Image: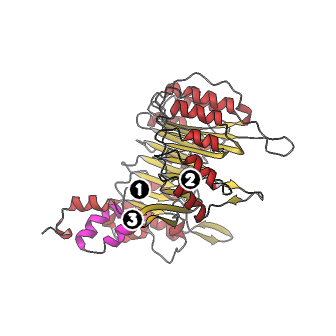
Amino acid sequence: MVTAESLNFDVLQIIFSYLSLSDLASVSLVSQSFLASALPRLYRSLIFYHNQAKPYPRTVTPFAVVKAHPDLAAHVQNIDIRVVPHTRVKQKTLPDPRFLRECISALQITEFLASFTCTIGSALPPLLPFIQSKSSLNTLRIAARLTEEQAKLVCQLPGLRSVTLEHASSAVMDALPKWAESLKSTLEHLTIHVSGFYTWTSTIQRLTKLRGLHVIGCPGVSHVDILSVTDHTPLIESLAFTVMEPDFACVLPRTSLTALKHLAVDLVACNLSPNTGRTTFPSSLLTSLLSLTRFAHLASLALRQSDRQPFPTALVEQIVEMHGTHLRSVRLMGFTLGSQGLQSLMGCEGLEKLAVSVPADNIHAFASALAGTATLHTLIDVGELGMDGKQVSLTTDRVRVLLEGVPSITRVVSESRLWTCRPTAYGPETRLERMKGSRGTGFWFIPPAEGRCV
């Protein structure tokens, strides 16, 4: 008789890959063989998010565990730091020195680090010298408010395939063209999120192997600049950029985006004061952008508008006509979508994820508009503003109306709550869960398969 204890190590690892990390931690306590099979996945990623930071220093950090048990370092491939405990020294708030020492100790003995993320600018400089020797490092995401000397350390990292720079300083952006030259044979994904400094064309022309280019919140770079250099990136599959209101009427360059699968556009209105009136919806701009993708097979489309306005049904129909066969994910943030527009959107044959504003006061009509889909399984509420300007939250009763009216939906996400639906002998069961602290660590414009967003 075959028992769980007698299963091959590789077989156990395959079985354990279907478990959540919390379940895996419980399973690892069963026996020595289970522990040995669970350890590689348990310690593959060392993360520190808000839910880990809240009980600090009462609880031990994963970095301290690796420091105390150096043999675990062989399993570590990813380090992800999104929050840092702080302490006050002479009226200044500084990163907790004990925490930094634990991180440095873990970095020193981690030989196979493939991905490093640190989005806390004050914590990054002490850690930079200790990632220089990581030959396996291929993914970097950092808060890049760095000095010239610190920027030099970052730009010495070779062989990277993915780079994400948040709030990059002028020193980092000035060094980027030279860094791009050294990465031109390996870099496939470049994301720059919020930076007022940039040397544009000279950087991208070097990166001919780019598959993902995301430039959001960089006033010095227009969407025309980005589209103009895509002729140098024929492999581009994922593209995200910001369009500022003064540029809504700009003529788009002729470019070929036949390989494009993911498009994200951030529409930023500048005239938001009461005296200037409401910004005109850039329907013609979006039509022109979509025309550039006519021969592409878009799998995901994300549009965000800073000045909430209705989304034209005619534009929905155009999206469905061009990309309805291939679209799997649609995100419309800052828009209101009417019932007719929703019904038209359900013409996408394989739509699986939809992020829109879910109306709290007319949930039956909303569910009715979605009833035509057989593939939509995840609905994300991006928020609706009430009369008082505050966001109106979904309730469990309203979610049940959605789940009963649209049987294909099994997940509904609103703010930090997740409703799931599963069939039982007595009918569908709705469960409400609180999202973990890791939610929100991804960008809205990153394709679903690449980001952490739901």
* Residue 176 image-quadrant placement: top right
The range drawn in magenta is 23-43
Number of marks: 3
Q: Which residue is mark 1?
A: 78
Q: Which residue reaches farthest left?
A: 1
Q: Which residue reaches farthest bottom?
A: 58
Q: Residues within 10 Å of mark 3 (few under 14, many from 20)?
A: some
Q: Which residue is mark 2?
A: 380
Image coordinates for residue 322, horizontal then vertical, percent: 53, 30
Q: Earlier in the sequence, mark 3 or mark 1?
A: 3
Identify the disc placed on residue 185. Answer: none
Q: How is the image coloured?
A: secondary structure
Marks 3 and 1 sit apart, C-alpha to C-alpha, by: 15 Å
Q: Residues within 10 Å of mark 2 (few under 14, many from 20)?
A: some
Q: Is residue 359 above or below residue 83?
A: above
Front-lying residue, 335 or 6: 335
* Residue 43 image-quadrant placement: bottom left
Q: Which residue is mark 3?
A: 21
